[in-house]
């Protein structure tokens, strides 16, 4: 994902790569961040935040919650705007992001893809029309290295659907089924998770009724869509000084 972001920034006429960060001990530290493109950017990969973010106006962060929160604190203190594509935050982490948004401008979304966010809008419409008489199941698949489950995008889909039909996802979500589970609760929203290979990200929402079913799917064949969406988020934040936004704000879908 880091390489996708670097390539997208290098190709954007209105952006300049200011820095690149990796974890301490990473083999690429000290090398040119764009060397893999065959066109060096003159920017070295750093593990030190002060060095990596020197002169930066924006940080695009696709890491882990603990890393993002550390980066976020630094950015809030130094007026750097943040685009967060990291998933797996607990409630305390989300609260920390909201608090940081009082000091700097943030776009926080479980998925930066334009297509995924348009899909979320479609799900909102579909759920309202099929609030009764249809069982709702969310199936997601990702690569073997993904550490959180269900994916942030799947959870966001569940939240959008639950809000649309007047339910609380915390109360109606079913994340696992095993043994004699009894009949399906018609008010539940089920999740199924697949992990394997190099699957970038597939999400399907199933509305299953009597005599018919509707499936709304989004499948990613490349991470480039996440990178392009992140750049759109950065452009959106250009005239913002503080505040917490999501991709619905960026794409004017509200």
Image (tube, grey):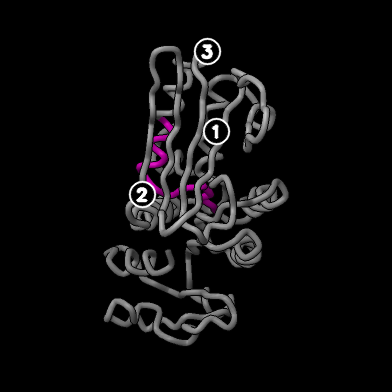
70 or 134: which is nearer to us?
A: 134
Residue 26 horizontal side relative to residue 185, left or right: left
Which residue bears the numbered disc 3?
A: 132
Residue under the point 58% across and 75% down: 49
Q: CA distance from mark 2 to mark 3?
A: 30 Å
The verdict on residue 188 being magenta is no
Which residue bears the numbered disc 1?
A: 158
Which residue bears the numbered disc 2?
A: 220
Q: Residue furthest toward the right?
A: 92
Q: Earlier in the sequence, mark 1 or mark 2?
A: 1
Circle 3: element type? loop
Residue under the point 57% across and 26% down: 162
Residue 5 horizontal side relative to residue 99, left or right: left
Q: Which residues are magenta?
A: 105-121
Instruction: Give residue 80's quadrant in the image.
Output: bottom right
Q: CA distance from mark 1 to mark 3?
A: 16 Å
Camera sees residue 247: yes
């Amino acid at each position: 994902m880091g390489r996708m972001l670097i390539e997208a920034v290098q190709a954007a006429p209105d952006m300049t790569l200011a820095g690149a960060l990796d974890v301490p001990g990473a083999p690429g530290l000290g090398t040119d961040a764009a060397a893999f493109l065959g066109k060096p950017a003159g920017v070295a990969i750093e593990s030190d935040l002060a060095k990596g973010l020197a002169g930066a106006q924006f940080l695009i962060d696709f890491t882990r919650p603990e890393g993002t929160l550390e980066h976020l604190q630094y950015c809030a203190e130094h007026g750097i705007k943040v685009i967060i594509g990291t998933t797996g935050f607990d409630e305390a982490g989300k609260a920390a992001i909201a608090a940081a948004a009082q000091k700097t401008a943030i776009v926080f979304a479980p998925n930066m893809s334009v297509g995924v966010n348009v899909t979320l809008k479609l799900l909102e419409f579909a759920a309202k029309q099929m609030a009764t008489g249809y069982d709702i199941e969310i199936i997601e698949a990702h690569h073997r290295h993904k550490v959180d489950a269900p994916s942030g995008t799947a959870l966001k889909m569940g939240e959008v659907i639950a809000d649309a039909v007047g339910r609380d996802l915390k109360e109606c979500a079913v994340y696992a089924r095993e043994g004699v589970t009894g009949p399906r609760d018609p008010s539940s929203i089920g999740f199924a998770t697949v992990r394997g290979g190099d699957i970038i990200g597939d999400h399907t929402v199933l509305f299953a009724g009597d005599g018919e079913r509707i499936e709304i799917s989004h499948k990613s064949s490349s991470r480039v869509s996440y990178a392009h969406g992140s750049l759109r988020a950065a452009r959106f934040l250009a005239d913002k000084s503080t505040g917490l936004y999501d991709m619905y704000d960026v794409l004017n879908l509200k």
